[in-house]
Each structure stands twice: as C-alpha cells, then as structure tokens.
Amino acid sequence: MANTLIPVDERNLSPDEVELLDRRRRRGQLFLVIGWQCLIVSTLVTVWAGQDITLSPGWAHPMFYWDVLTGVLAVAFFIAGVRLRRGANEFISY
C-alpha cells in the first residue's frame, strides 16, 4: 500500500530525483534558519534604530537602514525557505 503522507507526484521518483528533492528541502531548511537569524538580529537592532531615528540629524540614519534591511532579508528568506521546503512531511534534524 502506498504511503498516503507522501504527495502523489513524489511517490514514484527515481533515486536521482529523490536526491534533488532532498537537496531542495535541505536548502529550504537552511533558508528558514537564516530567516530566523535575520529576524533575531533585526529585533535586537530595533533598539539602536529607535535611538538613531531620534538623535541623528537629517537622512543620516544608518542603524534604521540596517534594521529595515535585516527585516526585509528575514521576510525574503522565510518566503524562499517555505517555498523550497514545501511537501516536507517530516522533521529534519542534523
């Protein structure tokens, strides 16, 4: 009997196709980890970004720009990670 947890299009893959699928899912997991790290850094940099916006004159707000950049990177890595890891029905632990 076929394993119903596996999507229909992944039930009859060749070994090479399974290797490509695993590689894609591992890359997705890596992007999710990088996304979490960027989110943590963005959260920590928010403290300095608030001071930067309050105390820096004019358009010179480098910490605010770094905060926005790390936030955008976190979202981009989360989206890419979820898309690449789609179809994974197991917990991957390394």
Image (cartoon, helix red, strand yellow):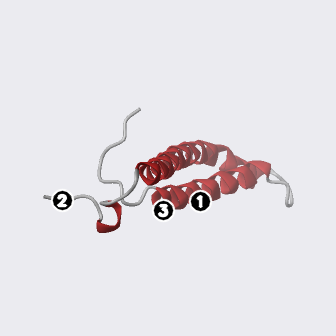
Relative side of 25 to 52, left or right: left
Tell whether label 3 touches label 1 (CB within 8 Å): no
Secondary structure under tag 3 reads helix
Can you identify the residue that label 1 sits on? 76
The disc, 1 or 2, on the residue closer to the chain's N-terminal end is: 2
Kind of residue at badge 3: Arg
Is 69 or 35 nearer to us in this picture?
A: 35
User: Residue 77's spot in the image, x, y percent?
Assistant: 57, 55
Q: Residue furthest left?
A: 1
Would you say 66 lies left or right of 24 here?
right
- Check residue 3 in the rendering and tell me which mark sits there, or answer none: none
Percent position of residue 63, x then y = 74, 48
Residue under label 3, please give it: 83
Q: Residue at x 47, y 50 (%)?
A: 16
Quadrant position of residue 13: bottom left
Residue drawn at point x = 34 percent, y = 61 percent: 10
Q: Secondary structure at mark 1?
A: helix
